[in-house]
Amino acid sequence: MSGTTRGGTAIVGVAESDLGKVAEGVTPQDLMAQGIVRALDDAGLTLGDVDGLFLAASQLRMPTISMCEYLGIAPRYMDSSFTGGSSFEALAAHAALALEAGACDVAVIAYGSTQRSQRGKFTPQRDLNDYDAPFRPRLPITGYALAASRHMAEYGTRREDLAEIAVAARAWAKMNPVAFDQRDLTVEDVLNAPMISTPLGVKDCCLVTDGGGAVVMVRAERAKSLKQKPVYLLGHGEAQPHHAITNMPDLTETGAKASGAQAYAMAGLGAKDMDVAQLYDAFTITTLMFLEDLGFCAKGEGGAFVREGGIAPGGRLPVNTSGGGLSYCHPGMFGLFLMIEATRQLRGTCGARQVEGAETAIAHGNGGVLAAQATLVLGTEATL
């Protein structure tokens, strides 16, 4: 996507809503509103400043319209483009376009979901696919298990390698006060957990939580005068090479290769320049594949890259420092929370889990069954 300037816009506010399992009667709109108000306060702004609203939701059919009514605002510009869990990275790029075009001055990207408290009462709609349906897959996990199986067959990746990813996420979560699951976890625990869809067991799967949050963006010149240290959008990219897993061109390679290349090219940086990586981890296999496709290691070398704590605290690359979807939270779609954590790392406000000297970060969102991919490269003022 062209039309935006490297560093032309910045994230100036981030916040989560309440997370975990919320009280009975709390709605997705409530959580979205919590995140928006908290993020605006983080930025030193108010609802009256918001004139751009960028929302995606799995439980709301018309999220922008319903939230405008809920909040009592009438933005000049709205966007509810939906690409699953990658929606929020894509919406950040759309917000940057709108901000630089003057279509809005303060853009808010937000999400809210009560997926845990509504468990068994709510089923997200899925597009039917004639190629998948005859095999009666249990989506999304069947599709991810298929990709994991192929990766193992082609490159010798082991279940132990995937287990290392879950253990690393848990180690980071233990340093995050709001992480949902902070219990001890070992490779053996992951391997011995109940199998869900071979080769993925229950500990290879993301959490099911309630939660929401918001990100506030403005043009770079305004960002300098606001409350927080700005985090600049240096590059972005999107790719949607398939929808159904049966139409995936190569089960071992995702569209992250293309979206990452776009984001790196705009930023003038590469994987070697990233201090922190926030990678969508709906399942352990996604982290491994995105490490490869985003250039942190060669194709087929993801298993070796994560072995012996390679992405855990103290490893070669800090990955999913919040604890990720595997241990921190995962309310249906996780892309927004990757942006929140990346921003906090670049601000230097992550406490015990802070990556020392972090100046650059990549936030990569994944939607559908390894389908819609969107990548952001973020940086501090030092990177401009």
Image (tube, rainbow, N blue to C red):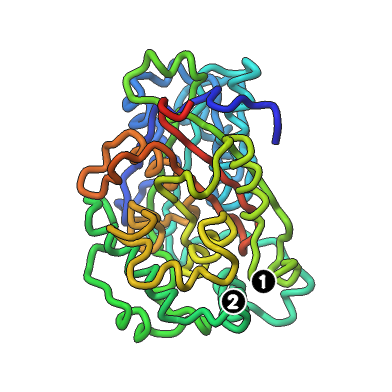
Earlier sequence position, callout 2 versus callout 1: 2
Q: Residue furthest front?
A: 272
| Distance between mark 2 and mark 1 Cα atoms | 7 Å
Q: Circle 2 is placed at which residue position?
A: 151
Can residue 34 be seen from the camera position used here?
Answer: no
The three-letter amino acid code for the residue at tag 2 is His
Q: Residue at x 58, y 78 (%)?
A: 155
Helix, strand or loop for disc 2: helix
Q: Residue at x 33, y 67 (%)?
A: 309
Relative height, residue 15 to residue 18 (above, below): above
Q: Residue at x 55, y 40 (%)?
A: 269
Instruction: Give 291 or 298, whichever is nearer the viewer.
Output: 298
Residue 29: % across, % down:
45, 40
Relative height, residue 270 to residue 65 (above, below): below
Instruction: Give 247 or 165, whichever is nearer the viewer.
Output: 165
Instruction: Give 337 or 55, whichever is nearer the viewer.
Output: 337
Give neighbour class at mark 1: few <14, some 14-19, many 20+ (Cα, 10 Å).
some
Give residue 257's quadrant in the image.
bottom right
Q: Residue at x 56, y 21 (%)?
A: 75
Q: Circle 1 is placed at which residue position?
A: 251
